[in-house]
Image: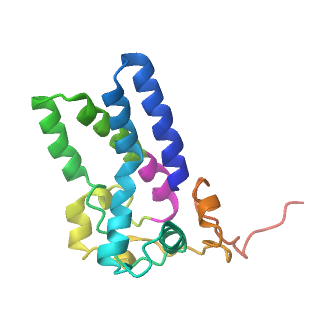
Amino acid sequence: MMPGGHLATSVALGGVAYAVTGSIELAVGCLAGGFLIDVDHYLDYIVFEKQWVRPDPASFLRYYFRNELEWVVLPLHSFELMAVLTIIAIWHPQPLLVGYLVGAAMHLAFDIAVNGDYSIRNRYSFYFFAYRAKHGFSASELLEPINLARDTGSRPFREFFSWRPSVEESSSTTENF
C-alpha cells in the first residue's frame, strides 16, 4: 500500500478510537502505528541506502516509488517487534502503546494484502525481521521485480496518495470482442 493509503486509514482508525474511547493517547497511538511506522523506510533510505546527500521528501519518495532500493531492513515492520511490544502492553497497558499496536497491526495487514500481491516474494515471511536478515536484507532477494510505468516517481507527492504503484500493461493481454 502506498503511504497515502496508510495515512487515510490511520486517520480513520484514530478518529474511531477517539470517538469510541475519548482517549487522545489511544488515537495518537493508532496514527503512529498505522502511518508513522513507515519512518523506518526513511531510515533505510538514509542509513542503508546512503542517500544522505539528498534527504528531502521528494527525492525519498521518488527513490521508493521507482523501486530503486537495494536494502530492506525495516526494523519497525517486524512481527518480532510487535510480539515484544504486545508483551509490554500486557504488563503495562498504556493507551499510546495499545493504540500503536492496533495501528501497526492494521498497517502490516494492509501491507500483506496489498504489497503481497505484487511486490513481495513471500508475503508473510517478509514481515519477520529474522527472515529479512537471513536474506541479507537484500531487496533483490526479498522483492519481486516490478514493471513500473515509465512516469513512476515523476510526481511523488501525487503518487503518495495512490493505492499502489502504476505498472506497465502486459503486452500479452488479449482484446475483448
> Residue 136: where, in percent of width, then height?
24, 77
* Residue found at the very far right of the displayed protein: 177
Residue farthest to the left?
A: 91
Q: Nearer the viewer, residue 134 or 165?
A: 165
Quarter containing the C terminus: bottom right
How would you classify the magenta stretch by its main secondary structure? helix
**Total number of numbered labels?**
0
Residue 143 versus residue 24 in the image, above or below: below
Q: Quadrant of residue 116?
A: bottom left
- Left or right: where 38 falls relative to 129: right
Looking at the image, is 46 positioned above or below residue 116?
Answer: below
Which residue lies at the image location 43% right of the left edge and 52% below the top edge? Answer: 111
* Quarter of the rendering containing residue 141: bottom left
Position of residue 43 measured from the top left corner of the image (x, y, whole percent): 32, 66
**Viewer-side residue, 23 vs 131:** 23
Q: Residue at x 71, y 70 (%)?
A: 169
Q: Position of residue 51 (x, y in %)?
A: 39, 79
Q: State yes or no: residue 133 in magenta.
A: no
Left or right? Give the position of 153 relative to 17: right
Residue 84 visible in this rendered orientation of the protein: yes
Q: Residue at x 19, y 52 (%)?
A: 80
Part of the protein shown in magenta: 110-119
User: Is residue 113 on the magenta stretch?
Assistant: yes
Q: Is residue 148 left or right of residue 141?
A: right
In the picture, measured across the screen, residue 63 lies left or right of residue 162, that is left
Question: Residue 133 at x, y = what percent?
Answer: 21, 70
